[in-house]
C-alpha cells in the first residue's frame, strides 16, 4: 500500500463484477462493492481476489471507509480501489483506511493529490496503514 495510484496508471485488468455475480463465478478475481453491501461476504474469497472496487456514490457517504477497513483487517492484500465521488479532501483518509488506488468521477490535479496525501505528518488514531499515532510517539 505504499503507493496510492490513479486508475489510469493501472495496467489492463479484468472488469469488476457485482457482488452477486462474483459469488456465482468461481473464476472471478475482481469485484465491485456498492454502498451498503456487506464487505464481510467477501472474507472467504480474499485469497483469490486481485481487485476490490468500493463505490462512493456521494462524498458524504462514508460506508466505503468501513468496508475498506473491514477488508484490510481481515487480511486482504490485493488492490483496493475507491471509485466515484472521490474528492481531494478524502484521499488522505482513504489511504489510512486501506485504499491504494482511486478512480474519481472528477478531474483531479496530480499536484493537489500529492499535497493532500502528504498534508498531515502525524495522525491521532490507529488505522490499517503503518502510521504510528502521535500519542504512541509521545508516550512510547
Image: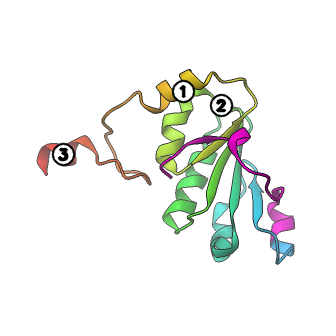
Tell me the element at label 3: helix
- Point 56% across, 51% down: residue: 66
Q: Which mark is residue 89?
A: 1
140 lies left or right of 111: left
Q: Position of residue 83 (x, y in %)?
A: 71, 41
Residue 15 is one of the magenta-drawn residues: yes
Badge 3 is on which residue? 137
Distance from Cα at disc 1 to Cα at disc 3: 26 Å
Farthest-out residue, left? 139
For label 3, the crowd category at 10 Å Cα-Cα, with few meaning under 14, some 14 to 19 and many 20 or more, is few
Give the magenta range: 1-22
Among the two numbered marks 1 and 3 on one chain, the one whose residue lies closer to the N terminus: 1
Residue 58 is one of the magenta-drawn residues: no
Badge 2 is on which residue? 59
Tell me the element at label 2: loop
Q: Nearer the viewer, mark 3 or mark 2?
A: 3
Distance from Cα at disc 3 to Cα at disc 2: 32 Å
Among the two numbered marks 1 and 2 on one chain, the one whose residue lies closer to the N terminus: 2
Among the two numbered marks 3 and 2 on one chain, the one whose residue lies closer to the N terminus: 2
Q: Position of residue 28 (x, y in %)?
A: 81, 69
- Point 42% across, 51% down: residue: 129
Q: Are marks 1 and 3 in contact (CB under 8 Å)?
A: no
Task: Determine which quarter of the picture holds residue 87.
Answer: top right
For label 1, the crowd category at 10 Å Cα-Cα, with few meaning under 14, some 14 to 19 and many 20 or more, is few
Amino acid at each position: 500500500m505504499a503507493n496510492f495510484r490513479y486508475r489510469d496508471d493501472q495496467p489492463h485488468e479484468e472488469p469488476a463484477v457485482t457482488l452477486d455475480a462474483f459469488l456465482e463465478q468461481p473464476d472471478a478475481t475482481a469485484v465491485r462493492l456498492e454502498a451498503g453491501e456487506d464487505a464481510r461476504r467477501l472474507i472467504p474469497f480474499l485469497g483469490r481476489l486481485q481487485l476490490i472496487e468500493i463505490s462512493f456514490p456521494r462524498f458524504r457517504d462514508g460506508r466505503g471507509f468501513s468496508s475498506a477497513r473491514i477488508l484490510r483487517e481481515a487480511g486482504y492484500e490485493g488492490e483496493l480501489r475507491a471509485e466515484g465521488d472521490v474528492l481531494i479532501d478524502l484521499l488522505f483518509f482513504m489511504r489510512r483506511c486501506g485504499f491504494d488506488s482511486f478512480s474519481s468521477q472528477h478531474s483531479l490535479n496530480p499536484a493537489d493529490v500529492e499535497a493532500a496525501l502528504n498534508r498531515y505528518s502525524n495522525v491521532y488514531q490507529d488505522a490499517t496503514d503503518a502510521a504510528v499515532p502521535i500519542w504512541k510517539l509521545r508516550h512510547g
